[in-house]
Image (cartoon, grey):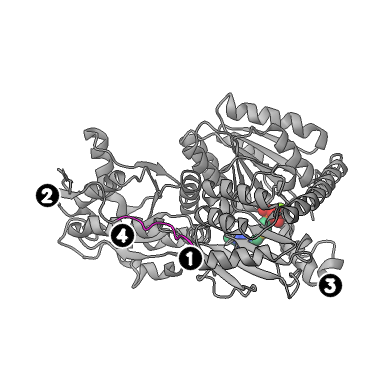
Amino acid sequence: MPRKELAVDSVAEAYLALLAERGVEYLFANAGTDFAPLVEAFAKAARTGMPVPQPVLATHENLAFSMAHGYAMVTRRVPAVMVHVSVGTANGICGALNAARDNIPILFTAGRSPLTESGLPGARDVYIHWAQEMFDQAGMLREAVKWDYELRNGQQLETVIDRALSVATTAPGGPVYLSLPREVLAAPLPGFSYDCPARRVAASPPGPDKGAIEEAARLLAAAGNPLIITASAGRDPAAVEALADFAQRFAIPVVQHRPRHLCLPAEHPCHLGYDAGLYLDGADAILVLECDVPWIPSLDAPRPECRVIHLGVDPLFSRYPIRGFPCDLAVTGAAALALPQLGAALDRHVTASVVSERRRRLAEQREALVAGWQKTCEGAAGMRPIHMAWASACIARVKPEDAIIVNEYTLMQEHCGSNLPGSYFGSSTASGLGWGGGAALGAKLAAPDRLVIAVLGDGSHLFGNPVAVHHASAMHKLPVLFIVMNNSMWGAVRRATLGMYPQGEAARSNKPPLIDLDELPAFEQVCAAAGGYGERVEDPAALPAALDRAVRAVTVEKRQALLNVICRGV
Ligand SMILES: Cc1ncc(C[n+]2csc(CCOP(=O)(O)OP(=O)(O)O)c2C)c(N)n1
Ligand SMILES: [Mg+2]
């Protein structure tokens, strides 16, 4: 088997070279004293031309992680993140929770305080090296990662990196964590050789069991009103095509509940929007496809006799402590592999007349749904403060077909649909806020020729460390269009309170506590302070032209832009 030899001086150099060799293009980093051997190795590589990942500086760990997340969701490649020992890890954990629930593979690494108090190269030489050490640094995030380990010596480097990458990328993907003590990185490593290509590779995605597919086909064939609910099937763009074909052939409606990816093109005739609650009652069989929460049981539920099939790489979501949706059949399998097989099996069971009757009904349902959306949008158009439906429709008007939308939960997709697989990304169901701005920058890094639009709430924008985000956009030349749907509040907290206590004190209060965000800064000026274009928009009629100007700033002037859209509350 072919092996490669590298002339390196340190483990740090070999580590970076191996990452590049294994396809890691970027290392998103927030540095500290633990980085000294890596900074040295990067500097040497810049002089010698040895291929290493490109270092991308991020001035907060949350930003580093969300940029990596954004890059990975678009490219489906593994990035590396490196943060400073225990404290940097602590700041990165929210990002790790988001990536874990979104099945995004990321090699999350952190230095470790030097282990030795003197003697070895890299031993402790700053007072923080005592206090920052922890008994179990990885213990903080073990629940959020698929695997964790510490690099103990250079001899084990190849095995450790290959294992980290193969575990992270094997479906269901997710972050892994590797700590890198400073002395180990600094240790001399005369002569490093490794397998090329790697001999420890990721496992193939699971293909479904034939019997389970046959049973699923039987259940769906027996149903008069089957329904598909999905959220993440589109993580794999090949699954979008498979789903579009499957739904179309059998005229099965598809609802995307809180989607994290585009699972079905918005104009597909089987697309029945985003609210599964509307159709649960009529369904007699439901295929829950790559979807952790297909409906909210305390609000809506299918009828007891409705049969429910769950299909996905981990259809039971085994890392969720509790998840009790009815499940008459669980099929383990990647959607792109399973749907064509399910289609072939279903073909043997269904009759053309059943399908054509269903197609007729589906067309009516879709027409009514789209007409309802249209009506809402028309009603919203003149509202001041601006209605999010109108803002979403205005975004739809300016966005090119291949634009990438990063939605930190405020865009209304029914008014701003996308058709291209890989063109829409919603926040992880872990919903650790502060993801959208960084994820949009990572998406732009992955797709420099596409317009990337981040749609954020005023609250989520602040969680995302806006100064750090705008600085990163300028520093790394990643022009993104940020749209802040600013309702001057944590509307979700208000909705939650009114939902639980509709007649309560808070509902009667003009200003219940912990909801309003008074005296918000002029977000557009923060963007402008970093060299971007910024505008505040209060008049709904002025929004389309403001969007045109902002898109122009991003696409023609190649600088970031932010529209601070003053929106209605909830
Ligand atoms: C890290 C983190 N902290 C707190 C929350 C709880 N939370 C969920 S939504 C929300 C408010 C978001 O406000 P905004 O982005 O303005 O959107 P709005 O609800 O106003 O539409 C908060 C605080 C969270 N999801 N993540
Ligand atoms: Mg808000």
SS of the residue at dot 3?
loop
Amino acid carrying mark 3 in the image: Gly
Mark toward the start of the polypeptide (1 vs 4): 4
Left or right: residue 466 compared with residue 274: left
Image quarter of residue 153: bottom left
Which residue is most to the left? 190
Q: Nearer the viewer, mark 3 or mark 4?
A: 4
Q: Nearer the viewer, mark 1 or mark 4?
A: 1
Q: Which residues are magenta?
A: 201-210
Q: Nearer the viewer, mark 3 or mark 1?
A: 1
Q: Which mark is residue 504?
A: 3
Between the residue at mark 4 and the residue at mark 2, the CA separation in whole angstroms equals: 23 Å
Q: Which mark is residue 209?
A: 1
Whether label 1 lies within 8 Å of ligand 1 gets the answer: no
SS of the residue at dot 4?
helix
Of 427 and 66, the residue lying toward us: 427
Q: Residue at x 81, y 49 (%)?
A: 369
Between the residue at mark 1 and the residue at mark 4, the CA separation in whole angstroms equals: 27 Å
Between the residue at mark 1 and the residue at mark 2, the CA separation in whole angstroms equals: 49 Å
Indicate yes or no whether the magenta region holds residue 86.
no
Q: Position of residue 299 (x, y in %)?
A: 76, 69
Residue 197 seen anywhere in this rendered image of the structure: yes
SS of the residue at dot 1?
loop
Mark toward the start of the polypeptide (3 vs 4): 4
Amino acid carrying mark 4 in the image: Arg
Whether label 4 lies within 8 Å of ligand 1 gets the answer: no
Q: Which mark is residue 163?
A: 4
Mark toward the start of the polypeptide (1 vs 2): 2
SS of the residue at dot 2?
loop
Main secondary structure type of the part rendered in magenta: loop
Q: Which residue is mark 2?
A: 190
